[in-house]
Structures are given as structure tokens and as C-alpha cells.
Amino acid sequence: MILYHGSNISIKQIDLNKSKPNKDFGRGFYLSEDEIQAQKMAVFKSMQLGGEPVVTGFRFNEEIMNASILNIRIFQDYSEDWADFVFSNREGKPVEQYDIVYGPIADDKIGLQIRKLKDGSIDKTEFLNRLKYMKGITYQYYFGTEAAVKYLTKI
């Protein structure tokens, strides 16, 4: 499988130390199977930080997701577990460190709902109800450890 990373710089080598904290699944390297999603992220990053939009492809053997070599967490859909996990990581209070996490992206539409939940204007039940009706879920892969990054090969 090919995974894509959108950025404002060319990725020559993955350096987890350059990863930003408080992201959906924690501090790590994020990729998507969807090249268009990666292109949108690259444009966003270049507008935000300067530079040019760059999408870098990586080969990943997805069979590792079913092996018991790494500590892997999979979220098939929006759920209370997913929401709790994202909230903890965004608050800088991760519950558990994983090598790889796969699950939905908390994009701007979902970010708005997260802010409403945090400010108390909706409760968790309403938050999850609103997510059920959102269309176009995009999934992301998170690689959070050097052990996980070793399974990515730049193409």
C-alpha cells in the first residue's frame, strides 16, 4: 500500500522529533491512503507555515497491522473510545502510547464539534450523534515510534 504525507517541506527522512504535540493520536508522523487528502494538507501547511506544498509517498506493508509485532490501535469509525482518545491527545494527556494508530481524522468540521463539547454547549452523546451524520470520513495513519517508522519506505 502507498501512504501519503502532505507538508510544506520535502521529507527526506522521517524525524519524529520534528512532530508537533497534541495531535489527534499524539505526537508522531501522519499519513493518508488518500493522496488528495495529503495534497490538501500540504496546501494548508504551506499557507500556514510558508514553503511549497509537497506530498511524499511511502510504501507500507499493511499486513503488519494484523501482526503482533507492534502496539497498534485501530478505530474503524467515530466512537466514544475514538473521541476520548483524541481528546486526551489534544489535551497533551495521552492515555497510552501506540506504535501505529489508524482511524478517522478530526478535521475542521469535527474540530468545531470538539470545541462545542469542550465549552459545554453540547454533551458527549450529542457530539457522537452529530458525527454520525457527517459525510466523507477520511482516515489517517499515525506512526509514533521509531519501531513503527521502520516499516515505511520512501518512494
Image: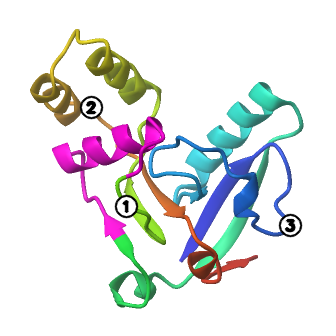
Instruction: Please determine whether, in this image, residue 15 is positioned above or below residue 131.
Output: below
**Mark pair 1, 2: CA separation:** 28 Å
Identify the residue shown where x is 55% and y is 65%: 144
Q: Secondary structure at mark 1?
A: loop
Q: Which mark is residue 134?
A: 2
- Please tell me the numbered disc located at residue 96: 1
Quadrant housing the C terminus: bottom right
Residue at position x 45%, y 37% in the image: 90
Query: Could you give the CA–CA distance between mark 1 and mark 3, rounded to whole angstroms?
Result: 29 Å
Disc 2, SS: loop
Magenta stretch: give its range. Answer: 73-94
**Above or below: residue 101 compared with residue 47:** below
Q: Earlier in the sequence, mark 2 or mark 3?
A: 3
Q: Is residue 53 above or below residue 123?
A: below
Is 125 or 32 nearer to us in this picture? 125
Amino acid residing under circle 3: Lys
Amino acid at circle 1: Glu
Describe residue 139's horizontal placement relative to residue 124 as left or right: right
Q: Residue furthest toward the right?
A: 51
The numbered dot on residue 12 is: 3
Rendered location of residue 76, percent (x, y): 25, 59
The answer for how far apart the CA atoms under marks 2 and 3 are is: 36 Å
Question: Label 2 amino acid?
Answer: Met
Mark 1 Cα within 10 Å, few/some/many (few <14, many 20+)?
few
| Residue 17 position in % (x across, y down) | 73, 58
Q: Is residue 76 covered in magenta?
A: yes
Sequence-wise, the earlier of marks 1 and 2 is 1
Residue, x 31% and y 19% (percent of image)?
Answer: 118
Question: Which picture quadrant has residue 128?
Answer: top left
Residue 5: in magenta span? no
Q: Secondary structure at mark 3?
A: loop
